[in-house]
Image (cartoon, helix red, strand yellow):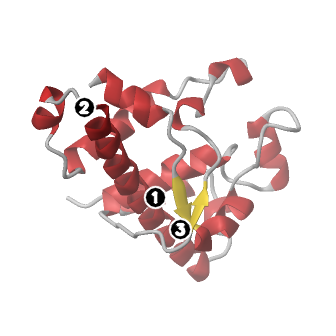
Amino acid sequence: MKYLKDIWAERTPNYNEDYQYLFDKLANKGNEGGDNEERAKETGRVFATQYELYIYAFFLGLYANQLQESTKKVNFGHKISEWGKKSRKTGRESFVEIQSFILTALITKCDVDFILLERSAEEDDIKTAVSKIIELMESYTNGGLQLIKEKLEDNDNYFITSSESPMNFLFSKIKN
């Protein structure tokens, strides 16, 4: 299955075009301008990087069991393997463990016969499985982005009122 993870990590996920403004509003774009966390505070953004918002939206959608297919996909622009690269910022934690948590969650939710896949020597079968995993990831992320959108419609400043607001919102969506 390591091969599956490597192929998955080299993919660049998408999200629904309708949510582009959430990335513009809540997350810093790119690595220009020095320390992303400091820049996030200075610009009133909640997330230091766009992939942090993507990860947050994924887990929000997963925990709330909110799936939404993309109608018009926007390329996220960041390979999964590049999320949280330690080489970009000293002191930054590597996101390799978070990437593993995401893949594990997707494997448990995905409609792929992994035993059959492991027995297959066909690279196309693995790529097809990865495509299904990515599609599910995008659906959970879009579901999370929809929840964020709805929360901001209720209170445009919700996520910046307190540093605990994003976690409180996430915890409120956990389904038992």
In the rendered image, which quarter contains the C terminus?
A: bottom left
Residues packed near mark 3 inside 10 Å, few (<14), some (14 to 19) or many (20 plus):
many
Residue at 49 percent across and 71 percent down: it is: 146
Residue type at numbered disc 3: Ile
Above or below, 96 relative to 45: above
Residue type at numbered disc 2: Glu
Q: How many marks on residues?
A: 3
Does residue 97 appear to the left or right of 151 in the view shown? left
**Can you name the residue that lies furthest to the bottom here?**
154
* Comes first in the chain, label 2 or label 1: 2
Quick one: SS at disc 2? Answer: loop
Q: Can residue 89 be seen in the rendering of this structure?
A: no
Does residue 13 appear to the left or right of 38 in the view shown? left
Residue 39 at x, y = what percent?
82, 43
Q: Cβ–Cβ below 8 Å for labels 2 and 3?
A: no
Does residue 100 appear to the left or right of 33 in the view shown? left
In the rendered image, which quarter contains the N terminus?
A: top left
Q: Closer to the observer: label 2 or label 3?
A: 2
Residue type at numbered disc 1: Thr
Above or below, 171 relative to 150: above
* Comes first in the chain, label 3 or label 1: 1
Residue annotated with mark 1:
141
Residues packed near mark 2 inside 10 Å, few (<14), some (14 to 19) or many (20 plus):
few
Residue 40 at x, y = what percent?
77, 47
